[in-house]
Image (cartoon, grey):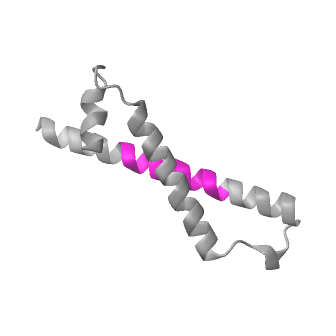
Amino acid sequence: MVWNAFATMQGLVLFTILVLESAHLIWKLRCSWIIENGGDLSKLPTKDEIHNRWVKSINLRLNFDKLQTDTKDTAATLSSPTWC
């Protein structure tokens, strides 16, 4: 029963990271498109550019979250299994 709670929490942590980082990237893409390009439809970023920026932002956030976990802390009992 306890293992199921950890698995659910780990999934929730990863899901939260994915949703927040994706929303932030959408906001950044829209702002840069409006501000830098004046909303010109011909200057929308390509699917490859969007994909590459998404992968980069997710990897940066996951690496930061992994480094931020302190194995000496009691909170690490939740986050350490997330990265193993």
Task: Write down the quadrant of residue 79 in the picture.
Answer: top left
Q: What is the magenta segment's predominant secondary structure?
A: helix
The single residue placed furthest to the top in the displayed view is 73
**Farthest residue in the right direction?**
38
The spot of residue 47 in percent (x, y) is 61, 75
Question: Is 68 a magenta residue?
Answer: no
Q: Residue at x 31, y 20 (%)?
A: 73
Magenta highlight on residue 14: yes
Q: Residue at x 31, y 24 (%)?
A: 75
Please give the name of the residue rendered at 77% of the width and 56% of the height, measured from the top-left corner.
31
Quadrant showing the N terminus: top left
Residue found at the far left of this picture:
1
Point out residue 63 in the picture as x, y percentages from the top left corner: 44, 44
- The answer to which image quadrant residue 84 occupies is top left
Side (left or right) of 8 relative to 15? left
Q: Which residues are magenta?
A: 13-26
Residue 81 vs residue 40: left or right?
A: left
Pinpoint residue 9: horizontal percent, then vertical percent. Answer: 29, 40
Please tell me whether residue 18 is drawn above or below residue 65 in the rendered image: below
On the picture, is 22 further left or further right than 12? right
Please tell me which residue is depicted at 62% across the width and 55% down the height of the picture: 25
Q: How far across and down, in percent of the image, does residue 23 sit? A: 59, 53
- Count the marks: 0
> Would residue 14 appear left or right of 20 to someone viewing this image?
left
Is 67 or 4 nearer to us in this picture? 67
